[in-house]
Image (cartoon, rainbow, N blue to C red):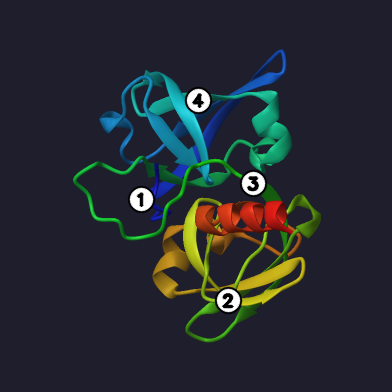
Amino acid sequence: MFTGIIETLARVEAIEKENTNVHFTFSCAFTHELKIDQSVAHNGVCLTVVKINADQYTVTAIDETLQKTNLGNLKIGNYVNIERCMPANGRFDGHIVQGHVDQTGKVISIIDNKGSWTYAIAYDQTAGNITVEKGSITINGTSLTVVNSKNNEFSVCIIPYTFEHTVFNYLKVNDIVNLEFDIVGKYVARLLGKIN
């Protein structure tokens, strides 16, 4: 389980395709603290560390992951948000994040508010996912609060610290982002669908 509080950025150092799988090699500030078989969220996608070599580590994404997330768009030199799983004795600063991306969305606008940034994200609502104002959403693994919710679209505001320490400062209009919708909202939506 994760909280959506990004620890650092990781840089893509190598990409190796093997059949339908892709092995991504990353470098990050805490590679020396990782261990084989550890779960790490990359742009919100939970992947297992399979190899460590000096200051670099490797994870493997299967075809299912590549089809449903933005990881298949990564290139060498790109950065991703990184979070290790939450320690049992840690503070719960974000919200419940499983590291299971529900679908992708597209950045449709970025507004510089001279102190914060508003990102509007469009997504396919026919997949059954919803947002609510002041509800939680995870974008590329970052726990955020929805400030404006519409059909097929929502907005979030980014404070300077988050902008500077996550991939938000690299995002551009039309970029594809990973979305994990609030787990409680997903269960409520599913239950209401069964009742109606």
Q: Earlier in the sequence, mark 2 or mark 4?
A: 4
Q: Residue at x 71, y 55 (%)?
A: 193
Q: Residue at x 38, y 60 (%)?
A: 94
Return the residue at label 3: 102
Question: At which x and y percent is residue 124?
Answer: 78, 56
Could you tell me the amino acid type at mark 4?
Answer: Val
Direction from residue 65 to residue 2 in the image, left or right:
left
Is residue 124 visible in the rendered structure shown here? no
Number of marks drawn: 4
Q: Nearer the viewer, residue 143 or 6?
A: 143
The circle drawn on residue 7 is 1
Check disc 2 and report its element: helix, strand or loop.
loop
Closest to the camera, between mark 3 and mark 1, is 3
- For mark 1, does the 10 Å Cα neighbourhood hold few (<14), some (14 to 19), or many (20 or more) residues? some
> Where is 142 relative to 114, above or below?
above
> Looking at the figure, which quarter contains the N terminus?
top left
